[in-house]
């Protein structure tokens, strides 16, 4: 009965949080605040996608910005040169990123510790350098360091362009809910159990007959697919991007910081990490960006050190304990 009551309370709490999230654009009209909220959800979505392989699979990819770039460049090139709607280009970019993720993952996911992290960093940085130094890749025009500018069409669903910030907010909120639902379902499936077992103790999992590399590659493919969708969202929201803005290591590091601080390998950890760090990033950029560029990464590093010392499993764990205490007190009153 107690477990049933807790389950009902959790459902009510999640429903209340979702209702608040849906109503926020109806209450907040400031474009700058809405932009911060959109970027917070954007990084929560990115980190949740990263978490499928970076959290549950027990490895530390540090080159996921490459797949954001693949998604952005694929959908934008298909839109600018072939007239394909970014909605379809988004899916094409996701599939391409998943295929490349599998190709990269098959050899690299066998590596341990820092070697895998360095391999993914090398891939991400290599892709950025390549795109930055060529105007075309085969028949595709990437414009080198100049990047790609998307033509402004106004409010057009088919062109993935909207004049209202609320539209972008609801799109990224929907994407975040989808990846959280997929993560929840995956972690309660056989694949999720095998993936978690392989991430915690690969040798023991292999001894039980689990094909650990296979499930890690599957997680890599799913993670890369959804990460690439965020690239299209980024491109369509800003309508301009260049290699360093979307393929740079800064974005990869920030995703990893958010996961580690929030709680990697948990469903809500990436969301909590983004809620803490993204607003902090924006305020740091606004007030200190002109004086100390890159200061947000220094602050992230300091927060990460403190979290690793006092809460090595991330802030999700103490916040979960606090939530349960409040819940029990409400029930006891």
Image (cartoon, rainbow, N blue to C red):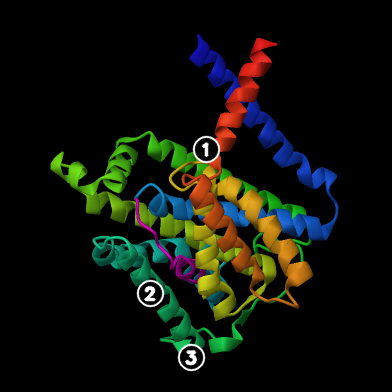
Q: Mark 2 points at which residue?
A: 123
Is 63 magenta? The answer is yes
Q: Which of 281 and 89 is in front in this view?
A: 281
Range of the magenta residues?
58-69
Question: Element under label 1?
Answer: helix
Is 322 magenta? The answer is no
Question: Element under label 2?
Answer: helix
Nearer the camera: disc 2 or disc 3: 2
Residue 127 figure quarter: bottom left
Is the residue 56 above or below the residue 93 in the image? above
- Indicate which disc residue 317 carries: 1
Nearer the camera: disc 1 or disc 3: 1
Give the residue displayed 59% in from the left and 83% down from the top. 147
Q: Name the residue under label 3.
A: 133
Residue 37 image point, x, y percent = 71, 53
Residue 241 image point, x, y percent = 62, 76
């Amino acid at each position: 009965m107690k477990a049933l009551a807790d389950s009902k309370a959790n459902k009510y709490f999640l429903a209340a949080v979702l209702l608040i999230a849906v109503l926020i654009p109806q209450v907040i009209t400031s474009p700058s605040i809405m932009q911060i909220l959109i970027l917070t959800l954007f990084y929560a979505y990115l980190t949740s996608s990263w978490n499928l392989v970076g959290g549950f699979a027990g490895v530390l990819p540090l080159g996921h910005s490459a797949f954001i770039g693949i998604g952005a460049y694929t959908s934008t090139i298909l839109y600018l040169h072939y007239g394909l709607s970014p909605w379809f280009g988004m899916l094409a970019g996701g599939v391409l990123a998943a295929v490349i993720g599998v190709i990269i993952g098959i050899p690299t996911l066998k590596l341990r510790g820092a070697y895998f992290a360095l391999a993914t960093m090398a891939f991400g940085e290599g892709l950025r350098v390549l795109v930055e130094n060529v105007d075309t890749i085969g028949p595709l025009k990437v414009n080198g360091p100049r990047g790609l500018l998307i033509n402004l069409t106004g409010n057009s669903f088919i062109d993935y362009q909207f004049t209202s910030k609320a539209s972008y907010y609801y799109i990224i909120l929907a994407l975040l809910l989808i990846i959280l639902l997929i993560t929840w379902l995956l972690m309660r499936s056989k694949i999720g159990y095998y993936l978690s077992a392989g991430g915690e103790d690969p040798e023991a999992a292999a001894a039980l007959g689990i094909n650990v590399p296979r499930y890690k590659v599957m997680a890599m493919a799913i993670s890369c697919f959804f990460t690439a969708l965020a690239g299209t969202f980024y491109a369509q929201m800003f309508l301009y991007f260049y290699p360093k803005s979307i393929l740079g290591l800064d974005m990869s590091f920030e995703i990893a910081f958010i996961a580690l601080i929030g709680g990697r390998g948990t469903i809500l950890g990436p969301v909590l990490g983004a809620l803490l760090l993204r607003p902090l990033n924006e305020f740091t950029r606004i007030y200190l960006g002109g004086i100390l560029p890159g200061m947000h990464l220094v602050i992230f590093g300091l927060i990460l050190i403190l979290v690793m010392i006092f809460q090595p499993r991330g802030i999700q764990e103490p916040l979960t304990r606090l939530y349960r205490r409040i819940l029990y007190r409400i029930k006891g009153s």
